[in-house]
Amino acid sequence: MNSSVPSPISDGIAEPVARADECVCDLQCEGFRILQKPGAFRFGTDAVLLSDFVTLKRNARVADLGAGTGIIAILLAAHHPGSVIDAVEIQPDMADMAARSVRMNGLETRVRVHPMDMRDAPEKLGNGRYDAVVCNPPYFKAGAALLSQSENKRISRHDVSITLDEICRTANRLLKSGGRFSAVFPAQRVFELMTAMERFRLSPKRIRCVQHTAAHAPGLMLVDGVKDGGAQLHWLPPLVLRNENDTPTDEWKRIYGEN
């Protein structure tokens, strides 16, 4: 059967047939699901936490840079019913899989996947058109960690094809004045991210530490900035994922829809 042809399933959502090397994962959020490919880059907790952290105004226009499997775009569409999201992904196979996940969830009118280099997005999608830009950037500097053997994982995890400055420059060009840029990044490198944001007029405004338990040091930071915003930074309470007995915290359950 042609994998691009959707087939009806019992809940009424059109589902493109997953290809032989793909699986369908339940997002535990309003019945939404996503295609994933075992062995390739797969979304993690960081993408789910960023989707929950993002604040959007009503009927926001959003750009998701480096969209990967489309997880953040789909979750934002679920959390913010009036939003419209342009998901930008440079890897053609990942962009194709994200587009099929969008069709599977019936989100074609609200989420559009663009297989392109994010640096081209302002010219092709429009300068100053967006209320918000979100990004889960590659975490590792090229040369600072062992490169993944998979090209797919290498592009997703290491900044071999894009730098923080290029991400922040692109976000600046896409955003309206007063628009928001939100990202998740390793705590040990968050100063680099915030410095790059400042260079491109994305003033950090909200920051939240993510800790495995209350006793652990932060591993991730959720950062939100405003284009042409002021200098005041608001520190939010830490996001603790696990209790001391290693059970999920109530907030973790809320984010994952388990309450």
Image (cartoon, grey):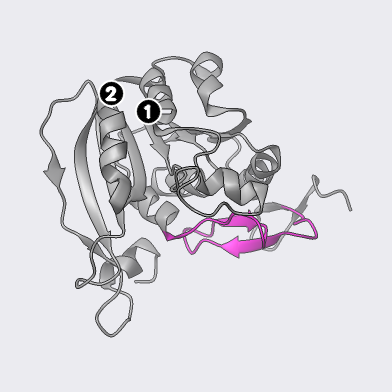
Label pair 1/2, CB-CB below 8 angstroms: yes
The amino acid on which the numbered mark 1 sits, given as a three-letter code, is Cys
Q: How far across and down, in percent of the image, does residue 80 sit?
A: 39, 43
Examine the rendered structure and indicate whether residue 253 appears above or below residue 72: below
* Quarter holding residue 36: bottom right
Q: How far across and down, in percent of the image, does residue 73 sit?
A: 49, 43
Location of the C terminus by quadrant is bottom left
Q: Which label belongs to residue 202? A: none
Regarding mark 1 in the picture, which secondary structure is present there? helix
Q: Give the range drawn in magenta.
A: 16-45
Q: Residue furthest bottom?
A: 245
Q: How far across and down, in percent of the image, does residue 20 sit?
A: 80, 60
Q: Main secondary structure of the magenta part?
A: loop
Quote the CA–CA distance across marks 1 and 2. 8 Å
Nearer the camera: disc 1 or disc 2:
2
180 and 81: which is toward the camera: 180
Residue at the disc numbered 2: 199
Examine the rendered structure and indicate whether residue 12 appears above or below residue 159: below
- Magenta-colored stretch includes residue 44: yes
What residue is drawn where x is 37% and y is 49%?
50
What residue is drawn where x is 39% and y is 26%?
171
11 and 161: which is toward the camera: 161
Residue at the disc numbered 1: 168
The amino acid on which the numbered mark 2 sits, given as a three-letter code, is Arg
Q: Dot 1, how many residues are within 10 Å of its Cα: few (below 14), some (14-19), or many (20+)?
A: many
